[in-house]
Amino acid sequence: EAAFAQNCAGCHGEQARGGRGFPTLGAREFLATTTDQQLRWLISGGVPGTPMPAWHLDLGGPFSDQQVLQVVAYLR
């Protein structure tokens, strides 16, 4: 929750409810159709052509593997 609040909530809103034109990540429909692996890829690598940056350390972001997994667990 802390990693999400500090790094993701600015765009995706508190409790992943969405905000300012950014997707709601806590929506049942999204979570039902997105695997944990897909969430890890989206968080780690970002989404080209959108404002979503890569968050993994290996790609220039601030998150370790563990922090990516923590954000996935928070979303679930």
Image: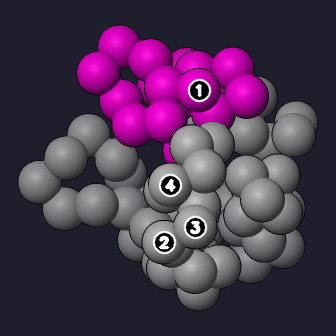
Q: Amino acid at mark 1?
A: Arg
The label number, if any, that marks residue 32 in the structure image: 3
Q: Position of residue 53 (x, y in %)?
A: 37, 51
Which of the two residues, 68 or 17, is positioned nearer the viewer here?
17
**Position of residue 4 in the picture relative to residue 42 (left or right):** right
Circles 3 and 2, Cβ within 8 Å, touching? The answer is yes
Residue 15 within the segment the image draws in magenta: yes
Q: Residue shown at 51%/72% (left/top)?
A: 34
| Residue assigned mark 4 | 29
Q: Amino acid at mark 3?
A: Ala
Label 2 and label 4: CA atoms lie apart by: 6 Å
Earlier in the chain: of badge 3 and badge 1, it is 1
Which of the two residues, 41 or 17, is positioned nearer the viewer here?
17
| Residue assigned mark 2 | 33
Label 1 and label 4: CA atoms lie apart by: 13 Å
- Indicate whether 74 appears above or below 51: below
Q: Residue shown at 11%/54% (left/top)?
A: 49
Q: Amino acid at mark 2?
A: Thr
> Is residue 44 in view?
no
> Is residue 43 in view?
yes
Furthest residue to the bottom? Answer: 37
User: Disc 3 or disc 1, which is closer to the eye?
Assistant: 3
Residue segment shown in magenta? 9-25
Q: How many numbered circles does the render carry?
A: 4
| Residue assigned mark 1 | 17
The label number, if any, that marks residue 54 in the structure image: none
Crowdedness near tag 1: few (<14), some (14–19) or many (≥20) residues, C-alpha within 10 Å: some
- Indicate whether 31 appears above or below 53: below
User: Disc 1 or disc 4, which is closer to the eye?
Assistant: 4
Q: Position of residue 52 (x, y in %)?
A: 34, 47
